[in-house]
Image: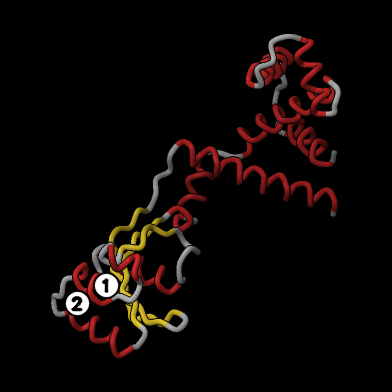
Amino acid sequence: LIEDKVVARKINQLKIKLNANEIRTYIDQKKIEQGILEPLEMQKYCRWLGISVGQWESYIISAYHKALLKECVIKEKNIENYFSQHKDLYTTISLSRIVKREKQEIDELWSQLKSGGNFLTIARESSIEANSGMLGGYIGGFKKGMINSLVWDKGLEAGEGQLIGVFQEKSFWTLYRVESINYGELTHELKVNIKERLFNDWLKSEVVKVRV
């Protein structure tokens, strides 16, 4: 209820015009999306939800108001700034690695690789990580938080095709090769998701102001 009041107040403050015909079209469109074409179907659907038709329409109108407000509050520049400031969230690093139990062993392999040794061959022959070893050390693509943060940071810093290490991870010693870095693109789908996130954060902050 507080949220709806905040939305109504902001719509009034920003002088956003509400069109009854557009609201009715929005409601009808939502019915079609649910496959509801007849009044009896609507009543049956609402009974299944445990609400009245009027309550359902009130919910849809509230969603319409939020959609209008979102368009006014969150601009393209806000979305682009968020993407730029949080680009690491959408970055994927593909890695290969070699795992050994002893530091001396991994140090020797590091020296071999730095001297021109073939990573794929060395990984297959020397890594104790069986699954990745069979694939020449390849372990896949990772987003931030999915792998050791130090490995992530060093991988971004080094760049594609570079070796990084040596790392102690639990009771093992590892070295990695950065296969590729995909920094992500600001696609239409991602813009929609970021816009929704920014609007929800903004609305929460407005609700807090009212409660305080």
Please count the marks in the image: 2
Q: Residue at x 70, y 27 (%)?
A: 64
**Residue 172 placement, left or right of 54:** left
- For the point 45% across and 53% down, which residue is it? 90
How crowded pointer 2 is (Cα within 10 Å; few <14, some 14-19, many 20+) is rated as: some
Residue type (three-letter) at the residue carrying disc 2: Leu
The residue lying toward the viewer, choosing from 151 and 5, is: 151
Q: Position of residue 127 (x, y in %)?
A: 30, 75
Foreground of the two, 8 or 60? 60
Could you classify mark 1 by the number of other residues whose Cα lies within 10 Å: few (under 14), some (14-19), or many (20 or more)? many
Residue at the location (45% across, 71% down)? 148
* Residue designated by label 2: 113
Against 202, residue 4 (above or below) is: above
Image coordinates for residue 17, horizontal then vertical, percent: 70, 22
**Residue 163, which numbered label?**
1
Residue 79's x, y, as percent? 52, 44
Asked if residue 176 is positioned above or below residue 31 in the image, the reply reads below
- Tell me the quarter of the picture where residue 8 sits: top right
